[in-house]
Amino acid sequence: QLQLVESGGGLVQPGGSLRLSCAASGSTLDYYDIGWFRQAPGKEREGVSCISSSDGSTVYADSVKGRFTISRDNAKNTAYLQMNNLKPEDTAVYYCAADPGRAQCILRPGDVIGYWGQGTQITVSS
């Protein structure tokens, strides 16, 4: 069974950067789409970005386009989310998910049928 562990969260000032990692164990990520999601207090979980298992194509939420970059290193069985120019509204718990490969990766958390990590807190504040 696939297990996912996020790391790299923390407190950062507005305009700062962080890189999240999603390390997998128990199985290979090769055939899974990887998604990053976040949930702020009092809000529903939302999709941030995803990357396809088949061709590496990516999808981004409008709110993070141009600031966040998703990537994967199948050799390391790890996915990443590079977050630049962070804003206070990016504050949330960030989760990675591994979903069986589809024609296009998805950003709807309710449609994920695979595996979730436990989440890592990102706080953007001065």
Image: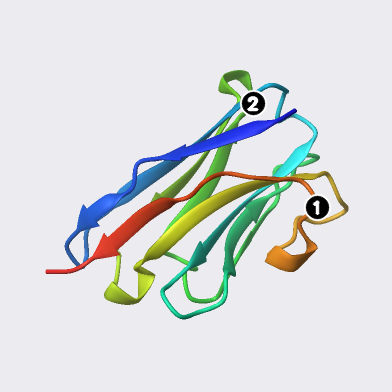
Residue depicted at x 74% and y 29%: 30
Above or below: residue 50 compared with residue 43: above
Q: Position of residue 55 (x, y in %)?
A: 77, 41
Q: Position of residue 68 (x, y in %)?
A: 44, 58
Residue type indicated by callout 1: Ile
How many marks on residues? 2
Tell which circle, 1 or 2, labels the residue nearer the N-terminal end.
Answer: 2
The quarter holding residue 33 reads top right
What secondary structure is found at the residue carrying circle 2?
Answer: helix
**Residue designated by label 2:** 74
Q: Position of residue 80 (x, y in %)?
A: 49, 41
Quarter of the N terminus within the rendering: top right
What secondary structure is found at the residue carrying circle 1?
Answer: loop
Question: Callout 1: 10 Å neighbours few (<14), some, many (20+)?
Answer: few
Above or below: residue 5 compared with residue 91: above
The disc placed on residue 113 is: 1
Left or right of residue 59, residue 43 in this image: left
Residue type indicated by callout 2: Asn
Q: Between tags 1 and 2, which lies in front?
A: 1
The quarter holding residue 106 reads bottom right
